[in-house]
Image (spheres, grey):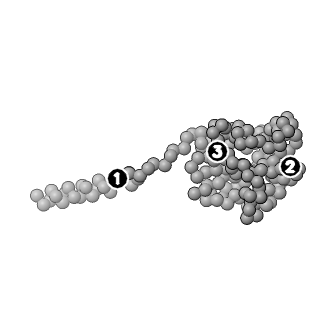
Amino acid sequence: MASSSADDDYMNFLNKANQDPSEGYAKPQQQTKQQTKEFKAADADVEIPRPLVEVTRGDGAFYISDADEPFEPVALRWDEDGKELPDEEEFATLIHHWDPKQAEVEISDPIDWNSSGQYTKIIDAVREAGQGNDVRVYRVAKGGVKAEYWVVTTEGKGKGAKLVGVRALAVES
């Protein structure tokens, strides 16, 4: 009988060792297919302004977060209709967010966003691309710890205007 008890103990040990280690813990929220979708950053027929091409080329144009992702140029057609820059919902619609009305978009001033001064070249290039127009930073939540930062301005006026700038993915844990 002693060996039966030892066999039972060994089986219990094996069963416990093979259990899912996350059993009993809350599962992380699964991202939907839409939340992993890339936002639209450029229209095929819109030329990317030279200052944006230059500032995103090379090793120095990264957004520093848990992922250190590169900045990418942004060039979208946008009828600014005298408003200069879009509000949160308009911006979400422009980048093809999966739910523009519920999108988590925050707008900030570049000075507040760049309080440490490490993105001055980025902001200057965006301002140059917009020929001195106002620059804004849009933070768009992508679900979980991911967000994208868009540093943009307008180029032109009315129906022929474009929203130009850069964007980068951030992982904020």
On the rendered image, what quadrant is the C terminus found in? bottom right
Which numbered disc flags the more N-terminal residue, 2 or 1? 1
Q: Nearer the viewer, mark 2 or mark 1?
A: 2
State how far apart marks 2 and 1 are (Cα): 59 Å
Q: Is residue 94 above or below residue 56?
A: above
Q: Mark 2 points at which residue?
A: 133
- Amino acid carrying label 1: it is Gln
Q: Residue at 83%, 43% (x, y): give it.
A: 84
Q: Is residue 99 above or below residue 49?
A: above
On the rendered image, what quadrant is the N terminus found in? bottom left
Labels 2 and 1 touching (C-beta < 8 A): no
Q: Mark 1 points at which residue?
A: 19
Q: Residue at 70%, 55% (x, y): give it.
A: 70
| Crowding at mark 3 (Cα within 10 Å: few <14, some 14-19, many 20+) | some
Q: Mark 3 points at which residue?
A: 104
**Mark 3 falls on what kind of element?**
loop
